[in-house]
Amino acid sequence: MRYGHRFLMTLTGLLLATCRLQAVGAEDPQEETKRLSERIEKSIDWYEVLPDISAKTALRPLPVMRWRNVARGQDGEAMMVVWVHNGRPVAMASIYPWDGYMCHEFGSLSRQAKLVARDGSAVVWSPNSAGLDFKNVPDAPVPAENPTARLRQMKSIAERFKGTMTGWKGDNSDREELRLLLRPLYRYEIKEAKEPAANLQDGALFAFVIGTDPEIVLILEAVGRADEAVWQFAFARATSGGLEAKLDGALVWTADKFPANRVPTNPQVTLRRPLDD
């Protein structure tokens, strides 16, 4: 009996020691999530975005949304950032950790092909085409004179669109309807701009999401002289999955699965660095 007691005491000691070692080596999930979020915050300034190659000053990154997609195995919190030039957003990026890397998924929101992104002195992104293809919104009201009324108009127009993720599978069996966030990601700040774009009256970015993860960004702009302005729309992808958008039930935009997002001259590019950098 005494031998059995000593054995139990020894076994208990070993188990307690093992538990202590596991506790020391284990990572608190909340601490890990916090660290990943801090890394995202720091990584916002990894790349400089400029309106064109001759610009002397980089644009300021502006976080507009934090999101997570647990269903896809994403670790930690992600963030969407925009870069604004003269009151209008010209670039966006989703920043998120994935497969041991910190990813910056850039997308051009420019009407021109002048954007440049640099990593130090090296140019890492320089689209050779415009990022967006705008079209007039059919049967839209004349843009209101009052900014508050124009925002109501934009929300009403946004609700006429439906976004769908057609996914990554060849048979579209992972197709999923997206949810529109009626609160804009970003409302244009044209009055505060030093050199606002000619004939641009107003605008906003809206997101179609899965959970809180933005997949499609809808861009609405009031364009033209104040007495003859019209509402225009365009879309930007925020995923590598296939996408489509409908207006009043009619298909108006599609994006293919698996875009060539490592080509630095494309309107979309994904830049990656190891998480341990």
Image (cartoon, rainbow, N blue to C red):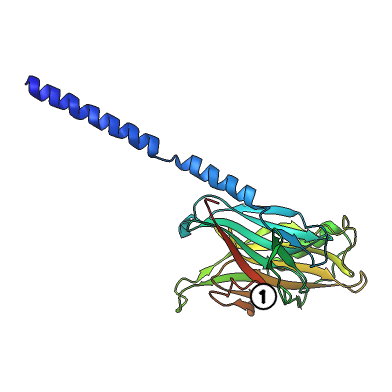
Answer whether residue 67 is visible to the viewer in this image. Answer: yes
The reply, left or right, for residue 80 in relation to residue 116 is left
Q: Quadrant of residue 12?
A: top left
Q: Is residue 159 visible?
A: no
Q: Quadrant of residue 146?
A: bottom right
- Is 164 displayed left or right of 152 in the figure? left
Q: Residue at x 44, y 74 (%)?
A: 173
Q: Position of residue 80 (x, y in %)?
A: 64, 57
- Residue tagged by mark 1? 247
Q: Give x and y (percent) for residue 93.
A: 65, 61
**Up-down relation of residue 248 to residue 23 (above or below):** below
- The one of 137 and 95 positioned closer to us in this rendering: 95
Q: Amino acid at mark 1?
A: Leu
The local crowd at label 1, few if under 14, some if 14 to 19, many if 20 or more residues have their Cα within 10 Å, is: some
Q: In this view of the protein, which residue sits in the foreground, 52 or 5?
A: 52
Q: Residue at x 67, y 72 (%)?
A: 267
> Nearest the camera: 199 or 89?
89
Q: Position of residue 200 (x, y in %)?
A: 86, 68
Residue ID at (53%, 53%): 275
Kindly give the residue lying farthest to the front in the view shown. 121
* Residue under the image location 66 percent in, 70 percent down: 236
